Image (cartoon, grey):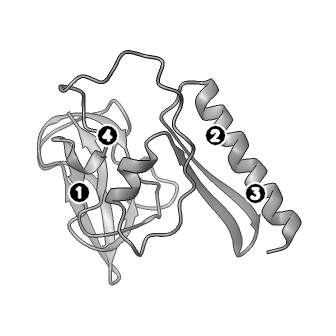
Amino acid sequence: MTKSSYDSDVAFIEALADLLNKNSLAELNVKREYGENDSLNVRVTKYAAQVAAAAPAAAAPVAMAAPAPAAAAPVSETAAPVDPSHHPGAVTSPMVGTVYLAAEPGADPFVSIGAQVKEGQTVLIVEAMKTMNHIPAPRSGTVKRILIEDGSPVEYGAPLLIIE
């Protein structure tokens, strides 16, 4: 990587952090393609300390934005957990593999944010050792968050989505 490429990536990440703060967002995920085998994956979040502590040591480096100044009221004890893996509605990966949100490329995803799911309904697929493992919804409810991108590698126990 050249010095100018590095500088432009840093400027890009800083611009994402500014965008995050200006629009009161909690998190941004962006993939920037440079060429056939060259890309930059960036995840910018306001919750750097909580997310970094829960991340496995072998995970790829993640860019974190500085937290926004706390001008709002203090967080109450009943606030929702910041780390998605501790959320009571978290669906976690039962294995290491690659996650897919649809049955095949170009097909409609199994679920989307706001979708109603029933217990046992397939919500995604984790491929492990060339075997497609359908992951069922552990409970009925509404999909509130999808925490992974289609085709992403996942670790055992990694939170995949939130069903409430």
Quadrant containing the C terminus is top left
Kind of element beneath mark 2: helix
Marks 3,2: beta carbons within 8 A? no
Displayed quadrant of residue 78: top left
Quadrant containing the N terminus is bottom right
Q: Which residue is mark 2?
A: 17
Q: Nearer the viewer, residue 86 or 95?
A: 86
- Is residue 47 at all visible to an observer of this figure? yes
Local packing at callout 2 (Cα closer than 10 Å; few below 14, some 14-19, many 20+) is: many
Residue 100, position in %: x, y? Answer: 40, 61
Q: Which residue is mark 4?
A: 82
Q: Which residue is mark 3?
A: 9
Relative vertical location of residue 45 with respect to residue 31 in this rendering, above or below: above
Q: CA distance from mark 1 to mark 4?
A: 16 Å
Q: Nearer the viewer, mark 1 or mark 2?
A: 2
Q: CA distance from mark 3 to mark 1?
A: 32 Å
Query: Residue 142's mark?
Result: none
Q: What's under tag 1, amino acid-wise?
A: Thr
Q: CA distance from mark 1 to mark 2?
A: 28 Å
Q: Which residue is mark 1?
A: 92
Q: CA distance from mark 2 to mark 4?
A: 18 Å
Instruction: Give the mark nearest the N terminus, 3 or 1.
Output: 3
Q: What's under tag 2, amino acid-wise?
A: Ala
Name which residue lies at 47% across and 54% down.
149
Instruction: Give the mark nearest the N terminus, 1 or 2.
Output: 2
Tag count:
4
